[in-house]
Amino acid sequence: MKQYTWNLIVRDADDFNPSFTTPSDVTRWLQTRPEFKQPREAVMVLMVDTRNRLRSFEHISSGTLNGSLVHPCDVYRAALHEPNCAAVILVHSHPSGNPRPSREDLELTRRLREAGHILGVDMLDHIIITPVGNTYSLKTHNLLDP
């Protein structure tokens, strides 16, 4: 097992799945994604297995300068179709440059946590990222738990 400086663990040449142990690991991976450099909100869900290895990810929604529509069905549909998905990490962008969650972001997180609880799919974190790389993890700020 070879570990790289950006915390991606490579098990072998054809099995290249990042393993996320902290919100910073997710942030480093996200900063390579073009969706989060756009001038409108983007929402993505990352599906991870029981060892927090990325199984897949899906772009859920693109919105406006200051909003995006996200429905629990869209988030968990992707997770339920992914074999070995044990949990999700929700990520969305704030093109304004301010990574702090809005009241709507906190309400969405609450609704998604409830839906995940019913479905048996944990929501590990909700991370907000800006085009310049500022991030806000709701888990780190103790805003993820009910």
Image: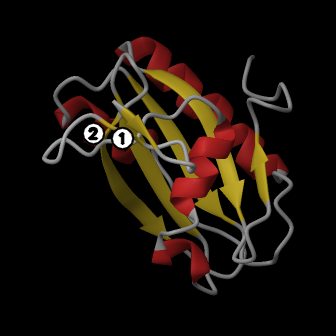
The image position of residue 88, as x and y in percent, is 45, 33
Question: Which quadrant of the structure image shows residue 50?
Answer: top left
Q: Considering only vertical position in the picture, is 121 above or below 82?
A: above
Say left or right for 116 vs 82.
right
Question: Which quadrant of the structure image shows residue 130?
Answer: bottom right
Query: Can residue 69 be seen in this snapshot?
Result: no
Distance between the Cα atoms at labels 2 and 1? 6 Å
Instruction: Specify few, some or many for label 2: CA neighbours under 10 Å numbering under 14, 14-19, or 20 or more.
Output: few
Determine which residue is flagged by label 2.
77
Instruction: Specify few, some or many for label 1: CA neighbours under 10 Å numbering under 14, 14-19, or 20 or more.
Output: few
Q: Could you tell me which secondary element the residue under label 2 belongs to?
A: helix
Asked if the residues shown at circle 2 and circle 1 are in contact, with their CB atoms under 8 angstroms apart, the answer is yes
Which residue is drawn at the image coordinates 36% and 37% (left, top)? 47
The image position of residue 44, as x and y in percent, is 46, 56
Which residue is drawn at the image coordinates 55% and 74% (left, top)? 63
Query: Can residue 6 be seen in this snapshot?
Result: yes
Which image quarter holds the N terminus?
top left
Say left or right for 125 vs 4.
right
- Closer to the camera: disc 2 or disc 1? 2
Q: Amino acid at mark 1?
A: Cys
Q: Nearer the viewer, residue 131 or 12?
A: 12
Which residue is drawn at the image coordinates 86% and 67% (left, top)? 98
The image position of residue 135, as x and y in percent, is 76, 56
Determine which residue is flagged by label 1.
73
Q: Nearer the viewer, residue 5 or 47?
A: 5
